[in-house]
Amino acid sequence: MNTIDDLAIEQEILPLFNFSLNAFTSSAILELLRTTLPSTQAVTERQNILKGFMSNHSVLSGYSYAPTYLNEVHFFLNNEKIEDVLQKRIGYRLWISKSQKTRYVSKFNQLILFLYRLQNNYFSRLNSGKFPKKYSIIITQISSFLAHFELHKYEQIVRENQLKNKHIIALTKTIMDLKTTGQVAAFWETLFLFEAYLSISLGIVKHQFVFPSFIKQGIKLTGLYHPLIETPVKNNFETLSNVIVLNGPNMSGKSTFLRAIGLCMYLAHLGLAIPARFGEIPFCNSFSVQINKSDSLRNGYSHFMTEITALKTVVKNAINQKHCFAIFDELFSGTNPEDALEICKTTLKGLTKFKNSYFFVSTHMQELKNIINTQISNYYIDCQLINDTPKFTYKLKKGWSNVKVGQLLFDKEGLNKMLQ
């Protein structure tokens, strides 16, 4: 099970891709964002589905309808006891009351006009050859469902306000047959997934994300950034090491960088495009992102025990041959500095043996730079001191930062004088 709460999928990431017209599609998008794919083959398949939507952008960029129509048609097909129309038929009398007839005519009018809009404006104009073969079959299934309603014929009848009892009886039989065979439920499921893919593809186009490729070893990301930063500093990152130590002073941007790389890795394993200009990454099947750490009141765990528990879960997964991707922000900051240093050394050295996994650890412990070796690479987020004033560049650099701004900021805020 992935531990990705700190990526804030629903609060921060969903809005990047959510251009949906209804709550059903929003739920389908969120489900896609919560579930990583099991193989590179599945990732490639979804990438190609989304590329198919992007290739049909001229047709689908204006995809729209009145959400209230969708809700009413959805309720009508799913929940209306439409069989009553046939049961109440006595001779030539179909309706018990005039108001009942008016209501049903209105509902059928909505149904026809809504489905006709989908077929005529969008599905009939799609180039299904741009999609993977498996998904083009699903699009064909949607079109086949719409074809049951003879929409070109009935749309004209509705426009001319000529919908008669015989038409309603015929349409009722069609709907009952489709419900009995499960095709109504299947239609909504495939339509909402179609709209979810469409919405995600619109987000990819809007934000100019790119699809990464998968390689056996190492990570290479060019122009990496976090999409929620209004004017982000973009960084290049490349490593063959499986343990990466990130250092730098407070406020330099370490956590933001970790969020960015965590988001890129995670989105890539959903089959989505990423916020970068170029990406080559390894395939992983276990994700743990620990950035917003806190005490767990529910479990009675302290900050430190929360860290220990998270690390143990990741190590267990790695021992069990999982290909892990894990982020630990300020690892072991919940305990005293002496303990933290010793167990952090043990942790970093121990993680290097899991060659198929990748671990990012940020730290303030300067003593850790002495344990760096060929299996552990270190980077820092640059900060420059100009006239004793820190200037945060947010640029990623290879190596170790010796800049310390804590005492400097303490003094600049006048606390030394105030406390003496």
Image: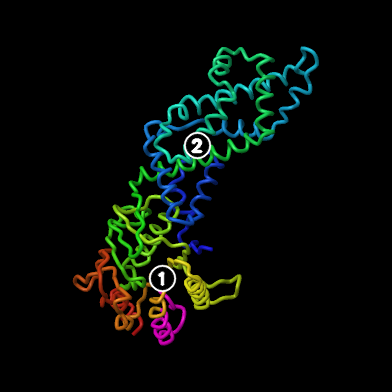
Residue at horizontal 45 percent and vertical 32 percent from the top: 63
Most extreme residue toward the right is: 90
Where residue 92 sits, quadrant-wise, is: top right
The residue closer to the viewer here, 66 or 374, is 374
Q: Position of residue 350 (x, y in %)?
A: 41, 80
On-image quarter of the C terminus: bottom left
Residue 18 seen by the camera: yes
Label 1 with label 2: CB-CB less than 8 Å: no
- Residue carrying label 1: 329
- Residue 232 picture location, percent across and down: 30, 56
145 falls in the magenta region? no
Query: Which element carries disc 1, helix, strand or loop?
Result: loop
Amino acid under label 2? Ile
Q: Which residues are magenta?
A: 329-347
Front position in the image: 64 or 88: 88
Q: Quadrant of residue 110?
A: top right
- Compare residues 360 and 186 and report the one nearer the observer: 186
* Numbered tag placed on residue 394 in the rendering: none
User: Is any part of residue 413 visible from this angle?
Assistant: no
Residue drawn at 74 percent across, 27 percent down = 83
Residue designated by label 2: 137
